[in-house]
C-alpha cells in the first residue's frame, strides 16, 4: 500500500566550511633616541603594515585580509613596546562580524609596555551584523610607570542601510595588569536582542553605538579635567571618571557615524595629536 521511504545516509565526511585563522605579532624597542621595529610576525589572514610616519612615533596597522569575521574564525594579535619607547597600533578599517551559521568568532588581543613606555591601542570600530557572534578579549601587561591608552568601539548594524540587529552574541573582556597586579577589568556581554538591550536607560538609552576608553598611567588622574572638558564639546553622550592611575571614559552615539565623529574629535584633543591616517580614509 505504501512504498518504503528512501533515506539518504548522513555524510560524516562532508567538507567543513573554510574558516579564518591568523596571528600577528609586532614589537618595538627604543634605541638611540628612536623607537624602532624589533620583531614582526604574521600568518594566515592577520597582516601588519608599518606606514611611513613623520613625528617619530611608529604606527602598526592591523589588517584582517578575510574582510570580516564569522562563526569559527580565530584571530590573535600581539603588540608590545620596550622600555622608553612609544608606539601606536590601529586597524586599516572597521572590523565586521557577519551572520554566523554556527559558533562565534574569537579575537584575542595581547598588549605589553615596558618601563617608561607608552602604547596606544586605537582600532577603528567593530560593526556587528544581525545574527553575528563575536567573543573578543584584550589583556595588557604594563611595567610600573608604563602607559596604555586603549579604545574599542562597537556599532550595531548600519542604520543608513536600514539594518536591524535583533539577534547577536557579543562578549568583550578587558584585563590590564601593572607589575603583575590587576588594575582594570571590564566585561561587556550583549546576547539576544541587541537593539532591545541597548534601549534600556541603564545601557545605551536607545543608542546603537558605544565605546570605552581607558588610560592606564601613574598620572592618568591628572588628565580627568582635560577629558571632561573635551567630552563637553561633543554631540554624543559621554562621561569620564578616574581613580588610582586609571581614567575611563564611556561614549554612546545614536549610530556609527555620530560615534565615530565624536571619538575622532575627543582623541585629537585628549592626545594632542592627529589620529593615524587610516582613520581618515
Image (tube, grey):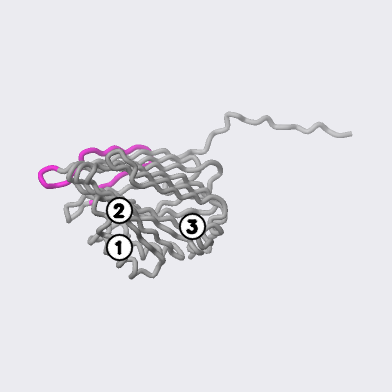
From this viewpoint, is residue 26 visible? yes
Q: Position of residue 135 (x, y in %)?
A: 46, 44
* Magenta stretch: includes residue 103: no
Of mark 2 and mark 1, the one earlier in the sequence is 2
Q: Give SS at disc 1.
A: helix
* Viewer-nearest residue: 238 or 2: 238
Helix, strand or loop at mark 2: strand
Kindly identify which residue carries mark 2: 215
Count neighbours of disc 2 (C-alpha within 10 A) and say few if under 14, some if 14 to 19, many if 20 or more. many
Residue topped by disc 1: 227
Q: Is residue 251 left or right of residue 34?
A: right
Task: Say which of 262 and 21 sits in front.
Answer: 262
Q: CA distance from mark 3 to mark 1?
A: 26 Å
Magenta-tinted stretch: 31-51
The crowd level at tag 1 (other Cα within 10 Å; few <14, some 14-19, many 20+) is: many
Q: CA distance from mark 2 to mark 1?
A: 10 Å
Q: Is residue 41 magenta?
A: yes
Mark 3 surroundings within 10 Å by alpha-carbon count, few (fewer than 14), some (14 through 19), many (20 or more): many
In the drawing, does residue 98 fall left or right of residue 79? right
The CA distance from mark 3 to mark 2 is 25 Å
Main SS of residues in magenta: strand
Circle number at residue 156: 3
* Lower sequence index among marks 3 and 1: 3
Amino acid at each position: 500500500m505504501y512504498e518504503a521511504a528512501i533515506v539518504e545516509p548522513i555524510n560524516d565526511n562532508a567538507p567543513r566550511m573554510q574558516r579564518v585563522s591568523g596571528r600577528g605579532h609586532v614589537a618595538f624597542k627604543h634605541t638611540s633616541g628612536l623607537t624602532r621595529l624589533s620583531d614582526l610576525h604574521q600568518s594566515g589572514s592577520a597582516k601588519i603594515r608599518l606606514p611611513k610616519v613623520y613625528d617619530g612615533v611608529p604606527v602598526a596597522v592591523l589588517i584582517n585580509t578575510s574582510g570580516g569575521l564569522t562563526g569559527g574564525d580565530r584571530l590573535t594579535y600581539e603588540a608590545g613596546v620596550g622600555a622608553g619607547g612609544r608606539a601606536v597600533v590601529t586597524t586599516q578599517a572597521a572590523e565586521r562580524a557577519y551572520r554566523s551559521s554556527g559558533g562565534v568568532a574569537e579575537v584575542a588581543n595581547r598588549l605589553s609596555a615596558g618601563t617608561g613606555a607608552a602604547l596606544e591601542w586605537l582600532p577603528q570600530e567593530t560593526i556587528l551584523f544581525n545574527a553575528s557572534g563575536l567573543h573578543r578579549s584584550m589583556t595588557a601587561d604594563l611595567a610600573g610607570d608604563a602607559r596604555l591608552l586603549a579604545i574599542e568601539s562597537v556599532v550595531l548594524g548600519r542604520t543608513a542601510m536600514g539594518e536591524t540587529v535583533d539577534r547577536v552574541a557579543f562578549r568583550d573582556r578587558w584585563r590590564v595588569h601593572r607589575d603583575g597586579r590587576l588594575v582594570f577589568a571590564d566585561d561587556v556581554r550583549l546576547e539576544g536582542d541587541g537593539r532591545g538591550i541597548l534601549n534600556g536607560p541603564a545601557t545605551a538609552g536607545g543608542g546603537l553605538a558605544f565605546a570605552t576608553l581607558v588610560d592606564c598611567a601613574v598620572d592618568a588622574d591628572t588628565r580627568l579635567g582635560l577629558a571632561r572638558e573635551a567630552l563637553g564639546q561633543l554631540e554624543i553622550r559621554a562621561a569620564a571618571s578616574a581613580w588610582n592611575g586609571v581614567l575611563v571614559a564611556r561614549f554612546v552615539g545614536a549610530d556609527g557615524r555620530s560615534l565615530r565623529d565624536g571619538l575622532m574629535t575627543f582623541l585629537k584633543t585628549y592626545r594632542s595629536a592627529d589620529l593615524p591616517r587610516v582613520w581618515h580614509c
